[in-house]
Image (spheres, rainbow, N blue to C red):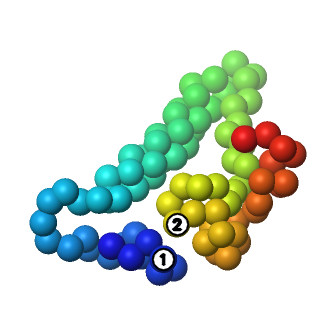
Amino acid sequence: MNLNAPFGHNDAPKAGWPKDGVFWFPSYRSSKTSMNMMVRKWDRTLRNDGVKVFAISPGYLATGLGAGVEMNKKWGGWGFEASGGVY
């Protein structure tokens, strides 16, 4: 698995066990998708009651997740300063 390639997370891992660095990708993506679905459901459920439901994303932040801060910045992630010093 090549995490340094722009889309290396789409590569099939090498044969053998354990699969280092592979399993957090599906769980991270699933949690993002789950939040989107939950917000959509809450919006449909509460719309006729006059309640507005929003999901706010901070955008692409260059965190230590995945390929690391520098690679995330190279790919367009915002640095720590973009968070207002909070994260």
Which picture quadrant has residue 86? top right
Q: Which numbered tag is attached to residue 4?
A: 1
State the CA–CA distance, disc 2 to disc 1.
6 Å
Point 83% across, 54% down: residue: 82
Q: Is 77 drawn above or below residue 56 in the view shown?
A: below
Q: Which numbered tag is attached to residue 67?
A: 2
- First in sequence: mark 2 or mark 1? 1
Q: Is 1 drawn above or below residue 54 in the view shown?
A: below
Residue 11 seen: yes
Tell me if mark 2 has few (under 14), some (14-19) or many (20+) residues whose alpha carbon lies within 10 angstroms of its own: some
Determine whether label 2 and label 1 are within 8 Å by CB. yes
Left-right relation of 60 to 45 = right
- Whole-percent x and y of residue 73? 69, 69
Q: Quadrant of the N terminus?
A: bottom left
Left-right relation of 49 to 42 = right
Q: Nearer the viewer, residue 78 or 40?
A: 78
